[in-house]
Amino acid sequence: MKIATYNINNINRRLPNLIGWLKRAKPDIVGLQELKCADADFPAAALGEAGYAAVWRGQKAGNGVAILSRVGEPVTTRTALPGERKDMQSRYIEAAVNGVLIGCLYLPNGNPQPGPKFDYKLRWFRRLSAHARKLLKANVPVALIGDYNVAPKDEDIYPTRSWDKDALVQPESRAAYARLLKQGWTDALRQTHPDQRIYTFWDYKRNRWARDAGLRLDHVLLGPILATRLKAAGVDRAERSREGASDHAPVWVELK
């Protein structure tokens, strides 16, 4: 089984890029983030023609998450994190797919910090951790995939000081990610590439793609059952170089 996550950064604008990648990479399950479309505008028909069933929670102004599958219909189990009823941002969706539970998330960016947006990021992270702990206690095959908007360590960002005040690299953000891992989750990309500088996001500004000035923000976290089946993981960097590309590249794992 091949599971992938991809911040598509506007699914309708980049639909040709997405369809092309699906045909080339042939993932079985995909989590998408930053759809930037209302529910009614989600391109379900086009994805169906490409062989993928989908569940989604859109949001016109931004955000939006979806789970795609070519190995059976996803069965939605949750469309939001518990813990804050007034939170209307579309950042989490969860579905059972072919015997695996997939949580697809788009964690808040948190900028500018300090301030209300950073406080929201940390609250959202606490809610995610609380829910993640319950998923582990359920003892089911589970993966939490998506754009976490955290570069966990210094090796997850190109050598620079220009991001020092950014919410993506703050000690509080990194500590929240580390606490999540300590519950028993495996960071699949880091597990398979322990010493490699490997990036998943390159900002459009300042020629960062050409300079390989990237950050590792997109993560696939595997629960213990799936972690024992981890075979390989990687980043489809070539997708970032294509015309009209998202500023993120897909991250994938292969399970035995």
Image (cartoon, rainbow, N blue to C red):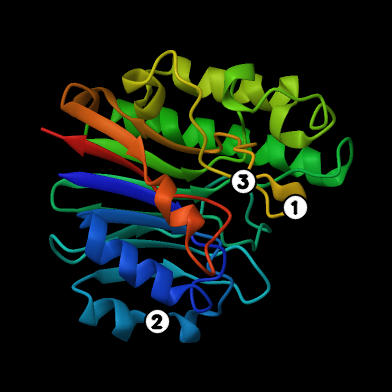
Question: Which one is nearer the viewer's eye here, 174 or 158?
Answer: 158
Image check: 69 left or right of 167? left
Relative side of 79 to 227, left or right: right
Position above or below: 242 against 100? below
Name which residue type carries label 3. Answer: Ala
Which residue lies under the disc numbered 2? 43
Of circles 1 and 3, the one toward us is 3
Q: Amino acid at mark 1?
A: Lys
Q: Amino acid at mark 2?
A: Pro
Choose between 135 and 254: the one closer to the eye: 254
Kindly indicate the quadrant of the structure image that contains residue 229. top left
Q: Quadrant of the C terminus?
A: top left
Circle on res. 210: 3
Question: For this view, does 22 lie left or right of residue 114?
Answer: left
Choose mark 2 or mark 1, whichever is in front. Answer: 1
Marks 2 and 1 close (CB-CB < 8 Å): no
Residue positioned 24% across, 53% down in the render: 96
Numbered disc 3: secondary structure: loop
Q: Residue at x 37, y 20 (%)?
A: 193
Q: Residue at x 48, y 29 (%)?
A: 198
Q: CA distance from mark 1 to mark 3?
A: 11 Å
Can you give x and y, in whole percent of width and height, for residue 66 in the image?
41, 63
Q: Is residue 211 above or below residue 179?
A: below
Provide the secondary structure element on which disc 2 rests: loop
Residue linked to disc 1: 205
Mark 3, residues whose alpha carbon is within 10 Å: few (<14), some, or many (≥20)?
A: few
Q: How far apart in space, not on screen, are marks 2 and 3 (Cα)?
A: 31 Å
- Cβ–Cβ under 8 Å for marks 1 and 3: no
